[in-house]
């Protein structure tokens, strides 16, 4: 079995972060989202990965290379524009050949893995095996109706009035039957070739399509809240590593990962947290669920629940919470009388105490 990872999307809801960094490379617990995706793929024993890429192809290639670091071999498959998931399958046809494959969206975080789904697909067969999860509001998703035996009877993409609360998560198992389906369908109202329409086409042809409920954690990483939530989820299970240098005046909690070459001076790291290689934390407090990238400097500050990307500098700032600080960004403390001074990029979001 191969894997097809779809990373062509542009991530407008994650601006300004996505202006400079494709959302699939946003760091969660200091590793790009795609590294977490590839771990899930590799854990299934799949080593051949087709990576569908669009505008951000160069950055994604630079970050992942040939995949060796992640235990897989990546073949990059350029898609001219984000024309839908089924279009990406069309693009990948020559790569996929007649193999079954795991289709995994490059912006979906599934840290509990896909082992159960894969086993179910192997055991029960069928033309496609979908994974679904109950959600409170299914309208932003592909919505699936099942019969009593777990067979899919109907799928609708982003319905206004959903007929079930089962949303399609960003991974499913497909067979070569899908290729005739993606060729047969027409673009949807939003102008995309929808995977849901392709799978519905299979159902209409009498092909057996099943779905199982996914019991693990699933998050579609679309906006900043998703980034913070995904980061929290990954840090919740982080193990203590003391790779860096912690001075005797510092206190470090049990679930803090300090990468080699980081320095902690007169600081309190409560955690769960991760501190990247080469970063310096001085006279600061780092609270729960904070990921600090490489080569950052945090001085005289207090932060929690945040993602701080490589090379950022934070000084003299207290109570920084639930924030995303971009690469090499500076957050500092100025003259008390001067009010707030902000130099922000396009689509930035800044909240000050009201
Ligand atoms: C896509 C699929 C949708 C699925 C969702 C999961 O939506 O079209 O069926 O439920 O991913 O994340 P999109 O992220 O393109 O809005």
Image (cartoon, rainbow, N blue to C red):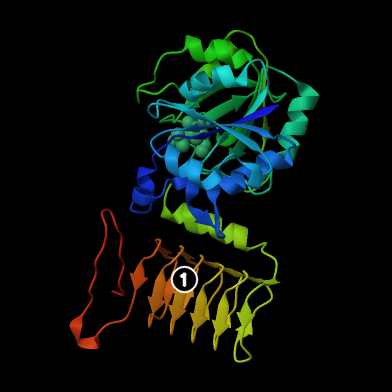
In the rendered view, would you say 325 is above or below 8?
below
| Residue at the left extreme of this rendering | 338
Residue 252 lies, in percent from the top left, at: 63, 81
Camera-side residue of 269 and 263: 263
Question: Is residue 2 shown to the viewer in this render?
Answer: yes
Residue at figure coordinates x 43%, y 66% from the top left: 311
Q: Is residue 218 left or right of residue 11?
A: right
Give the image quarter of residue 57.
Answer: top left
In the rendered view, would you say 37 is above or below 280?
above
Secondary structure at badge 1 equals: loop
Which class describes the residues within 10 Å of circle 1: few (<14), some (14-19), or many (20+)? many
Q: Is residue 318 left or right of residue 255?
A: left
Residue at figure coordinates x 49%, y 25% from the top left: 88
In the rendered view, would you say 188 is above or below 26?
above
Quadrant holding the N terminus: top right
Residue 189 lies, in percent from the top left, at: 35, 22
Give the image quarter of residue 262.
Answer: bottom right
Q: How many marks?
A: 1
Camera-side residue of 333 and 297: 297
Residue 165 lies, in percent from the top left, at: 55, 36
Residue at figure coordinates x 33%, y 53% from the top left: 16
Question: Is residue 201 shown to the viewer in this render?
Answer: no
Give the image quarter of residue 41.
Answer: top right
Q: Which residue is mark 1?
A: 296
Quadrant holding the C terminus: bottom left
Residue 218 lies, in percent from the top left, at: 59, 46
Residue at figure coordinates x 62%, y 85% from the top left: 251
| Residue at the bottom extreme of this rendering | 249
- The answer to whether the beta carbon of the residue marked 1 is less than 8 Å from any atom of ligand 1 is no
Camera-side residue of 25 and 196: 25
Camera-side residue of 111 and 26: 26
């Amino acid at each position: 079995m191969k894997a097809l990872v779809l990373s062509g999307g542009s991530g407008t809801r994650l601006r300004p972060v996505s202006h400079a960094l494709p959302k699939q490379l946003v760091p969660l617990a200091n590793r790009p989202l795609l590294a977490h995706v590839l771990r899930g793929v590799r854990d299934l024993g799949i080593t051949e990965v087709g990576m569908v890429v669009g505008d951000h192809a160069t950055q994604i290639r630079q970050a992942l290379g040939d995949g060796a670091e992640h235990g897989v071999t990546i073949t990059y498959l350029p898609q001219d524009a984000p024309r839908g998931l089924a279009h990406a399958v069309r693009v990948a046809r020559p790569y996929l050949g007649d193999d079954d494959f795991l289709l995994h969206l490059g912006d979906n975080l599934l840290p509990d893995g896909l082992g159960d789904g894969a086993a179910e697909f192997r055991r029960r067969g069928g033309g496609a095996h979908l994974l679904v999860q109950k959600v409170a509001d299914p309208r932003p998703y592909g919505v699936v109706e099942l019969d009593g035996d777990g067979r899919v009877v109907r799928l609708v993409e982003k319905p206004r009035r959903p007929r079930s609360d089962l949303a399609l998560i960003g991974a499913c198992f497909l067979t070569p039957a899908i290729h005739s389906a993606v060729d047969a369908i027409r673009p949807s109202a939003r102008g995309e070739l929808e995977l849901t329409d392709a799978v519905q086409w299979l159902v209409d042809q009498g092909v057996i399509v099943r779905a199982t409920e996914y019991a693990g954690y699933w998050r579609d990483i679309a906006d900043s809240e998703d980034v913070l939530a995904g980061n929290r989820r990954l840090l919740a299970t982080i193990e203590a590593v003391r790779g860096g240098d912690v001075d005797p005046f510092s206190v470090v909690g049990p679930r803090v990962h300090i990468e080699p070459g980081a320095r902690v001076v007169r600081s309190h790291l409560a955690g769960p947290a991760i501190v990247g290689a080469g970063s310096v934390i001085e006279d600061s407090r780092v609270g729960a669920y904070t990921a600090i990238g490489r080569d950052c400097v945090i001085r005289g500050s207090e932060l929690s629940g945040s993602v701080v990307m490589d090379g950022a500098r934070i000084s003299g700032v207290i109570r920084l919470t639930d924030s995303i600080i971009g690469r090499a960004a500076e957050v500092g403390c100025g003259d008390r009388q001067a009010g707030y001074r902000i130099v922000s990029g396009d689509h930035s979001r800044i909240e000050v105490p009201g």
